[in-house]
Image (spheres, rainbow, N blue to C red):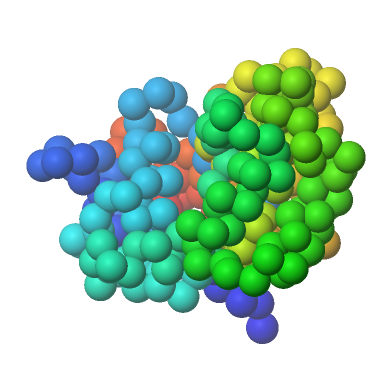
């Protein structure tokens, strides 16, 4: 039986007092790759923020990597985030230190202590994304595609069951976008990592078709069932 990584039932998502998405229902299983699409302002970011605990859930039931979002308080949010990875469009690397130190900073911030294990993990994730020779480069010495690979490596540090990717190809040229997409699909396949990728890039979606969740008119529509999720 497939392992459920995300399950939302009857979820209403608010920004302040404004209802952004209503009656959201979908389930994602281990190793699924799912696109999250929709026009700007239709709730994509609000949905992602709910999934990683930045927006509080008050209506409906939701489980993400085994955490009950209805019973999340600020003390539990760091534990949720240790079990998922986030990939940003603008990389968000620390510009005052090299790639190795960027990754080590994240490991220390999420509770790692053993120097040897940290070194092994950094080597492992850089190897997975194909840039182990770049560990001591500064971010400004790297291309956009290489920085995005570092961002993906960072998301993999705590061996997450779930990766939330927010427009990961948004600032990349078509050839580099292809490389990043192949890498993300490989991660889902090889490691059973569930990936939710928010994107506006329909060229990418057409080249790499997969299940799609679409935010529109206050709802989430699931392409696999063709009905409102």
Is any part of residue 196 visible from this angle? yes
Query: Which quadrant of the structure image shows residue 87?
Result: top right
Residue 74: horizontal and vertical position, in percent?
Answer: 26, 62
Task: Report the residue at 68% width, 20% height from top.
Answer: 140
Q: Residue furthest front?
A: 115
- Seen in the picture, residue 223 relative to 156 is either above or below; the reply is above
Q: x, y (%) of residue 27?
A: 50, 64
> Residue at horizontal 70%, vertical 28%?
138
Q: Residue furthest bottom?
A: 1
Residue ID at (68%, 27%): 139
Residue sitting at x 65%, y 44%: 101
Front one among 73 and 207: 73
Q: Position of residue 163 (x, y in %)?
A: 59, 53
Q: Is residue 135 left or right of residue 225?
A: right
Image quadrant assignment for residue 31: bottom right
Q: Is residue 138 above or below residue 74?
A: above
Quadrant of res 145: top right
Q: Is residue 129 left or right of residue 87?
A: right
Nearer to the camera, 126 or 117? 117
């Amino acid at each position: 039986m497939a392992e459920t990584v995300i399950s939302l039932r009857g979820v209403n998502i608010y920004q302040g007092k404004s209802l952004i998405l209503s009656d959201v229902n979908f389930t994602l299983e281990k190793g699924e790759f799912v696109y999250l699409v929709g026009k700007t302002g239709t709730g994509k970011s609000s949905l992602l923020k709910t999934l990683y605990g930045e927006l509080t859930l008050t209506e409906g039931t939701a489980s993400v990597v085994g955490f009950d979002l209805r019973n999340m308080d600020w003390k539990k949010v760091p534990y949720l985030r240790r079990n998922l990875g986030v990939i940003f469009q603008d990389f968000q690397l620390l510009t005052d230190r090299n790639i190795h130190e960027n990754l080590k900073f994240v490991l220390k911030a999420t509770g790692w202590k053993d120097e040897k294990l940290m070194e092994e993990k950094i080597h492992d994730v850089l190897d997975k994304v194909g840039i182990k020779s770049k560990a001591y480069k500064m971010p400004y010495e790297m291309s956009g595609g290489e920085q995005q690979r570092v961002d993906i490596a960072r998301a993999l540090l705590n061996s997450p069951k779930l990766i939330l990717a927010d427009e990961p190809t948004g600032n990349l040229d078509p050839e580099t976008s292809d490389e990043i997409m192949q890498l993300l699909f490989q991660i889902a396949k090889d490691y059973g990592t569930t990936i939710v990728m928010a994107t506006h890039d329909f060229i990418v979606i057409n080249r790499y078709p997969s299940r799609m969740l679409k935010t529109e008119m206050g709802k989430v529509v699931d392409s696999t069932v063709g009905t409102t999720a």
